[in-house]
Amino acid sequence: MGYVHIDSHAVTINTSGKTISVEEVAKAFFLMEPPGWISMLFKIRNRIVGVFGLKTTDGDGAKQPSEFKLEVGQKIGFSKVYSKSANEVIFGEDDKHLNFRVSLFLDQQSPGENNIVISTAVQFNNWLGRLYFLPVRPFHALIVKSMLRGVAKEISK
């Protein structure tokens, strides 16, 4: 196993006594509209990495609520669901340059008070993976935290 980058971010949300499920968390994560600056960064990323034959997010996988079943093996975006339990979903993808996994973990403290934790593990397969992650690293935490805030906002509606 090569070099690995690991991080984790959490938010506590109050759902006014309503119990939520990890499926609701995952649905909010995948189906919410990301902020414009994140969409722009992904468009730039897709243009650059496409030249090197790496996977892109353009037109891959389910993005419609009717197609969202969150089953192990299902493609969502350019990721695949690897594992699902009552309180966690793990998804990710393997590519030539790196493999990544993301855990969406729901920790219910009490009815209506929930911690949502997003953890990321990135394994670099070669020098291209390390090179790829250099410009990504400064934005990675900002993107994950922004997505986490979006999930919390979506679920709190």
Image: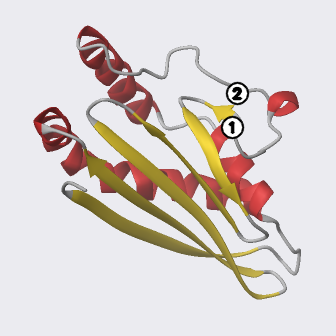
The answer to whether marks 1 and 2 mark residues whose Cβ atoms lie closer than 8 Å is yes
Locate residue 93 relative to residue 132 in the image: left or right: right
Can you identify the residue that label 2 sits on? Answer: 63
Image coordinates of residue 75 in percent, x first then y, are 65, 32
Q: Is residue 113 above or below residue 22?
A: below
Q: Secondary structure at mark 1?
A: helix
Which one is nearer the viewer's eye here, 14 or 122? 122
Can you identify the residue that label 1 sits on? Answer: 31
- Distance, label 1 to label 2, CA atoms, is 6 Å
Residue occupying image coordinates x 82% and y 33%: 65
- What colour scheme was applied to this rendering of the protein? secondary structure
Using a 10 Å C-alpha cutoff, classify the residue at mark 1 as few (fewer than 14 neighbours), some (14 to 19) or many (20 or more).
some
Image coordinates of residue 136 in percent, x first then y, are 23, 41
Locate residue 77 relative to residue 18 in the image: left or right: left
Q: Is residue 147 above or below residue 103?
A: above
Using a 10 Å C-alpha cutoff, classify the residue at mark 2 as few (fewer than 14 neighbours), some (14 to 19) or many (20 or more).
some
Image coordinates of residue 151 in percent, x first then y, are 63, 55
Determine the residue located farthest toward the bottom in the rendered image: 110
Task: Say which quadrant the N terminus sits in.
Answer: bottom left
Residue 88 got which mark? none
Which one is nearer the viewer's eye here, 34 or 64? 64
